[in-house]
Image: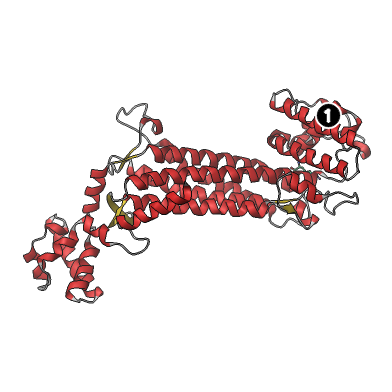
Amino acid sequence: MTQSKDAAANAMWGGRFASGPDAIMTAINASIGFDQRMYAQDIAGSRAHAAMLAAQGIISDNDAKAIGEGLLTVLSEIEGGKFTFSTALEDIHLNVESRLTEIVGEAGKRLHTGRSRNDQVAVDFRLWVRDQCDAAIAGLTALMKAFLAQAEAGTDWVMPGFTHLQTAQPVTWGHHMLAYVEMFARDRSRFEDARKRMNECPLGAAALAGTSFPIDRHATAKALGFDRPTANSLDSVSDRDFALEFLSASSICAMHLSRFAEELVIWSSAQFRFVRLSDKWTTGSSIMPQKKNPDAAELLRAKLGRILGATVALFTIMKGLALTYSKDMQEDKEQTFDAADTLMLGLAAMTGMVSDMAANRDVLRMAAASGFSTATDLADWLVRRLGLPFRDAHHVTGTLVAIAEKAGIDLPDLTLAQMQAVHAGITAEVFEVLGVDNSVNSRVSYGGTAPLRVAEQVARWKAALG
Ligand code: ARG
């Protein structure tokens, strides 16, 4: 970063300024430190704009050619690390345009015809966020495939299902894994949906009111891969909904990541031992040699804090802003960049961990069979076979659970005599429903945990994900 162009009034808009800005003014005002990240989008937008200006006869073909080639030179300078970004030139837009003019001379000064930095930043940022939607969609697809592979491997592995983190009913591993496929599928559709809505081009709205030059906004929209130009110039330069939608979808997605991260932390603990994470996804302790810490899962549990923070920040920035552009809106970028980086890293890390984790099937099965997990099956049997009203069946079962708990045994370990003492009608057939396999096999309702249903869902997702 250099201050060399700082000496006098700004070369780009200094006509009515007698002196340059205070150094602190420059420091608070400049965005080049972070918005240089949008260099490729800025150059793509400018190339589309220049080509359109020439096609409309607003600038000459020669000027457009010089601009187009000059911008490619700027691009390669930036990508080759040879470009000197200047704080005095405020932002990526002025940095690129100034360097372009150094390279191609007069023609460079014609680039800004019929355009403003207000529509320029709107199009740059939209292109950048659109790319991030694509990255999120790809990252989520990979993650869904990782969960799906786990589901397919363990369609009928039995594990405890929880409510309140208390053993509730036996479920299948495949069923639990597919719960996350559903969650991340909703996330993916949110990014797809947001992408569709944001795919309108604000370029050509100019400062706020449009322009008197005979520009062709449909042409620039098409060149930049948008479905159409935005329809209201005031809205075009003041809208940041696309970033808010991206951040909102990212927050929900990060919340989902944090939920599986928490399960991984619990499941990989010595007390649970439901899964093992390999050395690739754990760290050791500097003092306790036995430790294998699930740091990546813990970090993923925390990352929502940053992403949600960025979301709240942008809502707060946009709240109450009168139309149209205000400099407040320059604060839209840094945290969106950070949130996007955090999300993409999080998706990749979670995909790695899900692919890596190995379920301890025996431990899962033992845990599924303890904690009176088939108590509901017993109550349902009393309803089905003895015709008890469910509320009464619940009471009988509760009494049996209390007896078993007191004796330090599980439900299948009670004798028939002990059961009949609570309800005379109970027969030996009841023992068939107290096993965990019978329990999961019986839950065949649509969306239920029976391996049969889970296999159908695995097949559906395999067809959908390829
Ligand atoms: N750096 C500015 C931003 O990020 C670009 C737009 C500046 N527009 C203006 N009228 N000063 O918002």
Q: Report the side of 179 relative to 139 (left or right).
A: left
Task: Classify 330 as above or below 208.
Answer: above
The secondary element bearing badge 1 is classed as helix
Query: In the rendered image, which quarter is residue 72 located in?
Result: top right
Residue at the limit of the structure toward the left, as seen here: 417
Is residue 164 at all visible to an observer of this figure?
no
The verdict on label 1 being within 8 Å of ligand 1 is no
Taking the image as shown, residue 271 lies to the left or right of residue 41, namely: left
Residue in front for this viewpoint, 379 or 303: 379
Q: Position of residue 20 (x, y in %)?
A: 86, 33
- From the image, tell me which residue sits under label 1: 6
Residue at 13% in and 65% down: 429
Please say if 26 is above or below 445: above
Q: Which residue occupies 45% across, 51% down?
A: 463
Of 329 and 373, the residue lying toward us? 373
List x then y, in percent, for residue 360.
Answer: 27, 41
Quarter the N terminus occupies: top right
Residue 417: image quadrant is bottom left
Colour mapping used in the image? secondary structure
Seen at 29% across and 51% down, the residue is 156
Q: Residue at x 85, y 33 (%)?
A: 65
Q: Amino acid at mark 1?
A: Asp
